Amino acid sequence: AQTVTQSQPEMSVQEAETVTLSCTYDTSENNYYLFWYKQPPSRQMILVIRQEAYKQQNATENRFSVNFQKAAKSFSLKISDSQLGDTAMYFCAFMKHVTGNQFYFGTGTSLTVIP
Amino acid sequence: GAVVSQHPSRVICKSGTSVKIECRSLDFQATTMFWYRQFPKQSLMLMATSNEGSKATYEQGVEKDKFLINHASLTLSTLTVTSAHPEDSSFYICSASQNPGATYFGAGTRLSVL
């Protein structure tokens, strides 16, 4: 079975500062995907960033980057130059590398960006 | 990019009635779709896997007779909450995958049972 753990229920960061959200996971799979999703008050799930396990290079999307440590089964999200619009719930998620497979979500981290 | 449409976005119904929620993949075919339930300030909980042309696979603890899933075509899955009661009030979200790395979520349906 796959499990995803987010140990930070709530976090806050000053606008323009940098914040890191933690995520660890457990799996016996060797090939899989890891994701960070953002869920703003509208509750629409928005993909922030995706990492394929076989790629050693950490994924980056503009102000968002990850620190993927496969051996340690760690997948943290760094948000640089935080903006007010980054305020949301953030979910870490795991998916096996199989078409039509389900997500395994962490419990989420509520991030508040303070003006 | 690919879009998943979920309808309605909000529904209010009386206790004992049934409610149908639709999930459509607009520009791709999805042999598998997923239905999640989310309580306030909690994570998404997988309810069932909807398979086109076959029976849905339900997660442990989810009543298949209460939450009927039909995946009649490659672009449409429906979730029917039968004989809804106040405890069924929740936020329901569907998702569909175009390929292993590309999954799209519907905007969700907020169900309120009076």
Image (cartoon, helix red, strand yellow):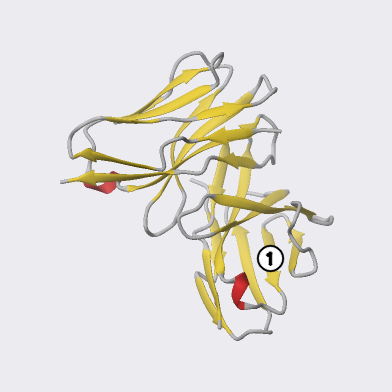
- The quadrant in which the N terminus of chain A is found is top right
Is residue A113 rendered to the left or right of residue A49?
Answer: left
Above/below status of A56 relative to A50 = above
Q: Residue B23's spot in the image, x, y percent?
A: 61, 61
Three-letter amino acid code at disc 1? Thr
- Counting the numbered discs, the total is 1
Is residue B59 rendered to the left or right of residue A53?
Answer: right
Q: Residues within 10 Å of mark 1 (few under 14, many from 20)?
A: many
Q: Residue B102's spot in the image, x, y percent?
A: 56, 39
Residue occupying image coordinates x 20% and y 32%: A17
* Residue B101 visible at all: no
Q: Residue A47's spot in the image, x, y percent?
A: 45, 41
* Residue A24 visible at all: yes
Residue occupying image coordinates x 55% and y 66%: B90
Judging depth in this view, the residue of A54 and B2 nearest the camera is A54
Residue most toward the left? A115
Above/below status of A33 relative to B4 = above
Q: Chain of mark 1?
A: B
Q: Tag 1, which secondary structure?
A: strand
Is residue A53 rendered to the left or right of residue A60?
Answer: right
Above/below status of B59 relative to A11 = below
Q: For residue B77, what is the image quadrant?
A: bottom right
Residue occupying image coordinates x 68% and y 80%: B18
Q: Which residue in the structure is indicated by mark 1?
A: B78
Q: Residue A81's spot in the image, x, y percent?
A: 21, 33
Residue most toward the right? B54
Residue occupying image coordinates x 76% and y 63%: B63
